[in-house]
C-alpha cells in the first residue's frame, strides 16, 4: 500500500501562536491564514509536520530548546510540531546574531529534511531562503507562501540597490518553486508578483476567508452594558494592532475632532501594541473616555460581537485595504470607511474593483485626519445614509467573500496537485 504524501510547513513563530507552543495547548490567535492551513492539513490525509522557527529573542523568550511534540486537541492531533528557539551569541551585533541564528536553524532544518523525507515543503516569506535551499540543492517541491506584499519586498523587487544590499534574499526568490501563493489583502500583490525575479513560477492570489457569526440581541445588549453604551448613538469601530502604521493615532485624533463638535457617538478601539499606552493616555488627557472606549485585545472567539455591534468600521492601515478586519466588518454588514488607494504603491486597487463606490466611503491618505473627520461627520449627520451603506454592504459581502473552510480546501487542493 502506498504511503500517504507528506508535507512540512515552515513558518516563523508568529506572536499569536507563541502561547499555543509554550503551553502545549492549541489556542491560536493572530494570522488565520497560517493556523487555518495547519488545521486544514490536519484533516487532509496528508502527513504533515510544522516547523516553527523563532526569529527574535521575544519569540523565543519561553522556548529554551529545540523540541518536537504533538498536541491532543482535535484540530491539530495529527500534526507533528517542531520548534527551534532563537540562538544568539555574546557578540553585540544584531546582524551577526541574525546570521548565527539562521545558520543554526538551517542545520536543524536540513537534518529534519533528511530524516523525514517530505514530498512537499510549504514555507512563509520569512523562510524564503530555507525554501530556496530545498528547491535548488535538494530538488524538493516547495510552495512559497506570501502573506501579502510588504514594503521591504516591494523595494527588493523594484530597486536594484535593495537587491544588491540583500543578495541572498533576492536570489532566494529566483529558486524553482513549484508555485507561489499570496494573500490578496490588496497590498499590491497583483502588480508586484509580476515583478518577482522568477517569472516561470505559477502564482496565485488568494483572498482570505471569513467565518462570521451572528449575535443575539441579548448578547449585544450585554456588550452595551459592559462598556456603558447608550443604544441611541452610532458605534464606530477600529480593530487592529496598535502600531503607528495601522492608523490608530489618527483614529483617536479624528474622534477628538468629532467630540469637540458636539456629536453624540461611541468609538471603540480593539487591539494591543506599542502605541497602547499612548492611546490610553491621550484618551485620558483629552477627557474623551465617555465616548472613546479603549477595550484592548479581544479573543477571536468573541470579536465578532463587536463587529455586529458596530455601525461604522474605519480602516486606516496604509499598506493594505483588504485585511482580515475589513473582511470581518464587511460580513457583519458594517458601513465601511476605507483609506483611499495608492496608485503609486498599487494598494487598494482590488478593493476599488470589488467594492463599488456606493458600498464604502473613501477618505484621502494625504489628509487623513481632516478628510476622515469630514467624511464621518457627513455620515453622523444623516443616520439614513449609515443605514443605506450597511444594507448595501450586507448584500455585497456574501457575493464576494467565502468561508475559511472553502478557502483552505482550495489551497490544500493546490498542495495536492504539487505532490501528484
Image (cartoon, grey):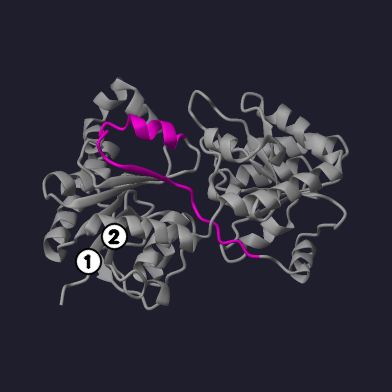
Where on the picture, by quarter, is residue 300?
A: bottom right
Q: CA distance from mark 1 to mark 2?
A: 9 Å
Query: Callout 1: 10 Å neighbours few (<14), some, many (20+)?
Result: some
Lower position in the chain sequence, tag 1 or tag 2: 1
The front one of 369 and 75 is 75
Give the magenta-colored segment's residue range.
188-213
Q: Which residue is mark 1?
A: 5
The front one of 279 and 217 is 217
Task: For the C terminus, give its image quadrant.
Answer: bottom left
Residue 212 painted magenta: yes
Q: Evaluate if marks 1 and 2 touch, with contact meaning CB atoms under 8 Å apart.
A: yes
Q: Residue sitting at 42 percent across and 38 percent down?
A: 149
Task: For the N terminus, give its image quadrant.
Answer: bottom left
Image position of 357 (left or right of 133): right
Check the image and report above or below for 377 versus 268. Answer: above
Q: Residue sitting at 54 percent across and 50 percent down?
A: 324
Q: Which residue is mark 2?
A: 416
Q: Position of residue 56 (x, y in %)?
A: 34, 49
- Disc 2 secondary structure class: helix
- Disc 1 secondary structure class: loop
Residue 273 painted magenta: no
Q: Position of residue 267 (x, y in %)?
A: 74, 47
Image position of 286 (left or right of 159): right
Q: Residue sitting at 11 percent across and 50 percent down?
A: 138
Check the image and report above or below for 378 versus 411. Answer: above
Image position of 45 (left or right of 182): left
Q: Residue sitting at 52 percent across and 25 percent down?
A: 343
Amino acid at each position: 500500500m502506498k504511503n500517504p504524501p507528506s508535507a512540512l510547513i515552515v513558518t516563523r513563530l508568529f506572536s499569536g501562536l507563541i502561547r499555543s507552543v509554550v503551553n502545549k495547548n492549541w489556542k491560536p490567535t493572530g494570522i488565520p491564514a497560517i493556523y487555518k492551513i495547519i488545521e486544514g492539513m490536519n484533516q487532509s490525509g496528508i502527513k504533515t509536520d510544522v516547523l516553527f522557527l523563532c526569529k527574535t529573542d521575544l519569540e523565543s523568550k519561553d522556548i529554551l530548546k529545540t523540541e518536537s511534540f504533538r498536541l491532543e486537541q482535535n484540530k491539530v492531533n495529527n500534526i507533528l510540531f517542531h520548534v527551534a528557539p532563537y540562538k544568539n551569541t555574546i557578540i553585540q551585533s544584531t546582524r551577526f546574531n541574525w546570521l548565527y541564528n539562521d545558520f543554526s536553524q538551517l542545520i536543524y532544518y536540513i537534518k529534519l529534511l533528511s530524516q523525514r523525507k517530505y514530498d512537499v515543503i510549504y514555507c512563509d516569506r520569512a523562510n524564503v531562503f530555507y525554501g530556496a535551499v530545498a528547491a535548488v540543492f535538494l530538488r524538493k517541491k516547495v510552495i512559497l507562501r506570501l502573506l501579502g506584499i510588504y514594503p521591504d519586498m516591494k523595494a527588493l523587487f523594484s530597486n536594484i540597490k535593495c537587491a544588491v544590499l540583500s543578495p541572498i534574499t533576492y536570489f532566494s526568490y529566483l529558486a524553482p518553486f513549484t508555485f507561489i501563493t499570496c494573500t490578496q489583502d490588496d497590498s499590491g500583490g497583483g502588480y508586484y508578483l509580476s515583478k518577482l525575479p522568477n517569472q516561470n513560477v505559477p502564482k496565485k492570489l488568494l483572498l482570505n476567508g471569513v467565518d462570521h457569526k451572528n449575535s443575539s440581541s441579548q448578547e449585544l445588549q450585554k456588550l452595551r452594558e459592559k462598556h456603558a453604551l447608550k443604544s441611541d448613538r452610532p458605534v464606530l469601530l477600529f480593530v487592529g494592532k496598535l502600531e503607528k502604521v495601522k492608523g490608530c493615532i489618527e483614529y483617536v485624533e479624528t474622534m477628538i475632532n468629532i467630540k469637540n463638535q458636539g456629536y453624540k457617538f461611541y468609538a471603540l478601539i480593539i487591539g494591543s501594541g506599542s502605541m497602547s499606552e499612548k492611546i490610553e493616555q491621550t484618551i485620558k488627557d483629552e477627557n474623551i473616555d465617555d465616548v472613546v472606549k479603549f477595550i484592548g485585545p479581544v479573543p477571536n472567539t468573541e470579536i465578532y460581537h463587536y463587529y455586529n455591534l458596530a455601525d461604522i468600521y474605519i480602516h486606516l492601515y496604509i499598506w493594505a485595504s483588504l485585511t482580515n478586519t475589513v473582511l470581518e466588518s464587511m460580513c457583519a454588514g458594517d458601513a465601511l470607511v476605507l483609506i483611499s488607494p495608492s496608485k503609486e504603491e498599487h494598494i487598494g486597487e482590488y478593493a476599488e474593483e470589488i467594492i463599488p463606490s456606493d458600498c464604502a466611503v473613501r477618505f484621502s491618505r494625504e489628509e487623513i485626519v481632516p478628510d476622515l473627520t469630514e467624511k464621518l461627520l457627513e455620515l453622523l449627520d444623516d443616520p439614513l445614509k449609515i443605514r443605506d451603506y450597511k444594507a448595501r454592504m450586507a448584500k455585497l459581502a456574501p457575493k464576494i467573500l467565502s468561508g475559511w473552510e472553502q478557502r483552505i480546501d482550495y489551497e490544500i487542493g493546490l498542495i495536492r496537485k504539487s505532490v501528484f
